[in-house]
Amino acid sequence: MTPVNRELAEAVASEQFGLAASARNLPGEFDRNFVLTTSGGEGYILKFSHPQTADQQLDFENALMEHLASSPVSHVVPRIVLTVHGSPVARLPGGLRARLQTRLPGRMLVDVRPYSGNLLREIGAILGELDFALENFFHPAMHREWMWDLTKAAEIIRPNLEGVNPAVREDVAYYLARFETEVLPKLNALPAQVVHNDANDHNLLVHAREEEGFKVSGLVDFGDSLFAPRVCELAIAAAYTILEAPDPLSAAGELAAGYHSVNPLSEGEFEVLWDLVGTRLAASISIAAKRAHSGSKNTYHQVTADAARETLNRIRRIAPMEAFEKIRRLAA
């Protein structure tokens, strides 16, 4: 199989997309990604898809991004760049597939902690607008079996529980039990649609503006997108924005307030939100433990593991009713 490296990325950029650019490796969970920079300073992201990713899944991602290109959140979503043959996917020898997207400005959210209340509310509002824009978007591949489907968290957590660090195993088990008894019975009654499903602190980009602090400049990587209860979008984002936060509950509340201001949440969604935040962290810890035991050498697979363990332990001390009431009050 052709090695996916910087030399190949530059050749594909030139031959398939008509770009003379230098390439730099970008960390990723499944795809091999490269930052491309032209001599004129233009930036792009070249993505080599994982061999196990179905063509229909790539079509789903492309269609979703095209849909958002004419929405109010188009300014924070990358644009698809077609090949010289007019295709969104370059098909290469050996079964390789490559896609090119515009590179958005800014730094990863993870690099600008701590987050202000205004920034958290803006992130929430962007996600609310995104989900509103996707409310009536449908595609045959939106229903998928995926390890990061939050509604299937028990199927990920339970078989990997014994491999979780003993210091946090009890916390993971607590949120597994909460998910199965308090969340699952309510999920089917909640609004569901296509969601980004991975608005984490590496996929959200921000840049500084004078006197305004940091502002959202991008939301990238739609590779985890699927059809799910809408509240999962907010819960996943909250799970990452509360990492290392001085007051995790207030941070989640600010995020929820921003979302609710543009895309109102139902009472049922507020009821399950905090438990879903803990569930996402528990699932992330379980997946990281599984990968560590399997001998994965991809450092990105453990990028939030330590912070997730520490945060899960902290938020478990917050009573569910206290969390519900404070988040509901901040969003009012």
Image: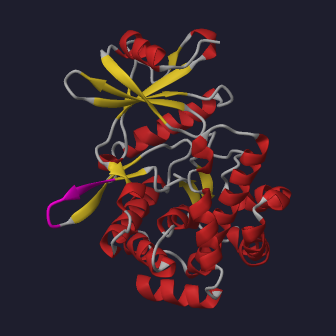
Image: 104 above or below 172: above
Q: Quadrant of residue 142?
A: top right
Look at the image and tell me in which quarter the C terminus lies: bottom left
Q: Which color scheme is applied?
A: secondary structure
The x and y percentages for residue 227 are 61, 52
Residue 190 visible to an observer of this rendering: no
Decide which of 222, 190 is in the foreground and name it: 222
Image: 278 above or below 203: below
The x and y percentages for residue 210 are 14, 61
Range drawn in magenta: 206-211
Magenta stretch: includes residue 210: yes
Decide which of 22, 72 is in the foreground and name it: 22
Outermost residue toward the left in this view:
210
Decide which of 171, 185 is in the foreground and name it: 171
Image: 118 above or below 29: below
Image: 3 above or below 325: above
The x and y percentages for residue 40 are 19, 24
Residue 166 visible to an observer of this rendering: yes
Residue located at (39% from left, 17% from top):
13
Residue located at (33% from left, 66% from top):
122
Residue located at (37% from left, 66% from top):
125
Look at the image and tell me in which quarter the N terminus lies: top right
Left or right, residue 160 beside residue 319: right
The x and y percentages for residue 150 are 67, 59
Total labels drawn: 0
Magenta stretch: includes residue 35: no
Left or right, residue 183 beside residue 307: right
Question: Is the stretch drawn in magenta largely helix, strand or loop?
Answer: strand
Q: Quadrant of residue 298?
A: top right
